[in-house]
């Protein structure tokens, strides 16, 4: 019988840091193991990811060869599959590879019936467990521990959305009314103050204009008219009645 694969202390996990799309309804992200398989793999070996429902991981059996790898299409019945076949050199310490692996990210490989391992979308929220398995020409050589259960997000059902608007309490309505009244009073006060200031400015301008209008305007190039002498025997009447010549007194009335 072949020797059992070496059990590595590494435990796969979802990245603990915030990451867009870390968990979705059909996919999840995994940290890429680095420097984990160097002592147990050579250039011809490959590393696989085994995915199983959490309650079926204990019953998973490592395939003796690549031809016996459980495909993605058998997940609903076998409750497990293997995917992400990668050269072991991609996980070496000197490899410059992305730090994140995405499980379930291939939306076109499912149902094609090809022999290439499919990384298709996961059909349910799970939970799932995963482990890495090093496969050589003669079967499994090393494996990691199973991950903790990974639960995907659940898509919201339209029936769970409440179409009724949220009803506010009477206290909220009273507070809103008071705030509206205060706002109206403040706006009125500002308008009154602005109007008074504008009216005072207009009055100041009018007073300046009236003072200017009351000033007399005298020309300096036209000499003033000299008073004309009255004709002989003419005396002035009261102002505005002109001048007239004195008449001799009439004869005395007969006695």
Image: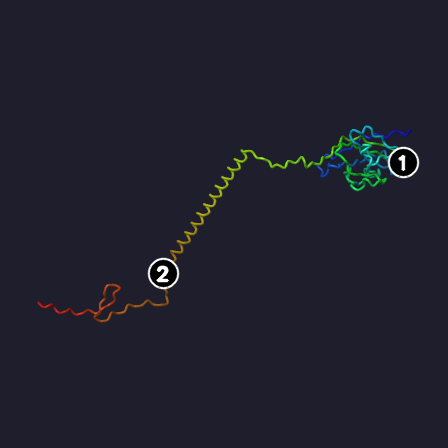
* Position in image of residue 118 (x %, y %): 82, 39
In the image, residue 111 sits, relative to residue 220, either above or below, namely: above
Residue farthest to the bottom, as pictured? 232
Ranked by sequence position, the earlier of labels 1 and 2 is 1
Q: Report the side of 237 relative to 151 (left or right).
A: left
Query: Which mark is drawn over residue 217?
Result: none
In the image, residue 232 sits, relative to residue 68, either above or below, namely: below
Report crowding for label 1: few under 14, some 14 to 19, many 20 or more residues within 10 A (C-alpha). few
Place residue 87 in its image quadrant.
Answer: top right
Place residue 93 in its image quadrant.
Answer: top right
Quadrant (top left, top right, bottom left, bottom right) of the N terminus = top right
| Total marks in image | 2
In the image, residue 211 sits, relative to residue 170, either above or below, namely: below
Q: Mark 1 = which residue?
A: 137
* Position in image of residue 157 (x %, y %): 69, 36
**Closer to the eye: label 1 or 2:** 1
Give the residue drawn at x 49%, y 42%. 184
Residue farthest to the right, as pictured? 1
Place residue 66 in its image quadrant.
Answer: top right
Query: Which mark is drawn over residue 216?
Result: 2
Q: Nearer the viewer, residue 62 or 220?
A: 62
Say what secondary structure mark 2 lies in. Answer: loop
Q: Are marks 1 and 2 in contact (CB under 8 Å)?
A: no
* Position in image of residue 35 (x %, y %): 81, 35
Quadrant (top left, top right, bottom left, bottom right) of the C terminus = bottom left
Report crowding for label 2: few under 14, some 14 to 19, many 20 or more residues within 10 A (C-alpha). few
Q: CA distance from mark 1 to mark 2?
A: 121 Å
Q: Nearer the viewer, residue 157 or 82?
A: 157
* Position in image of residue 43 (x %, y %): 87, 38
Say what secondary structure mark 1 lies in. Answer: loop
């Amino acid at each position: 019988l072949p020797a059992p694969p070496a059990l590595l202390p590494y435990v796969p996990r979802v990245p603990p840091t915030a990451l867009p799309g870390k968990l979705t309804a059909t996919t999840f992200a995994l940290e890429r193991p680095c420097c984990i398989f160097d002592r147990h793999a050579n250039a011809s070996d490959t590393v696989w990811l085994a995915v199983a429902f959490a309650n079926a991981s204990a019953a998973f059996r490592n395939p003796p060869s690549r031809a016996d790898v459980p495909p993605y299409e058998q997940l609903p019945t076998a409750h497990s599959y293997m995917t992400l076949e990668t050269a072991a050199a991609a996980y070496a310490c000197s490899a410059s590879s992305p730090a994140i692996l995405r499980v379930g990210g291939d939306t076109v490989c499912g149902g094609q019936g090809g022999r290439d391992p499919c990384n298709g979308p996961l059909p349910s929220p799970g939970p799932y467990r995963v482990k890495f398995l090093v496969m050589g020409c003669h079967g499994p050589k090393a494996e990691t521990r199973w991950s903790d259960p990974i639960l995907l997000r659940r898509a919201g059902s339209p029936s769970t959305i409440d179409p009724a608007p949220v009803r506010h309490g009477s206290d909220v309505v009273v507070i809103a009314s008071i705030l509206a009244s205060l706002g109206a009073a403040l706006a009125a006060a500002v308008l009154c103050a602005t109007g008074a200031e504008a009216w005072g400015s207009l009055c100041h301008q009018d007073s300046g204009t009236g003072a200017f209008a009351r000033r007399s305007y005298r020309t300096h190039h036209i000499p003033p008219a000299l008073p004309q002498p009255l004709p002989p025997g003419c005396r002035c009447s009261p102002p505005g009645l002109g001048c007239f010549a004195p008449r001799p007194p009439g004869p005395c009335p007969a006695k």
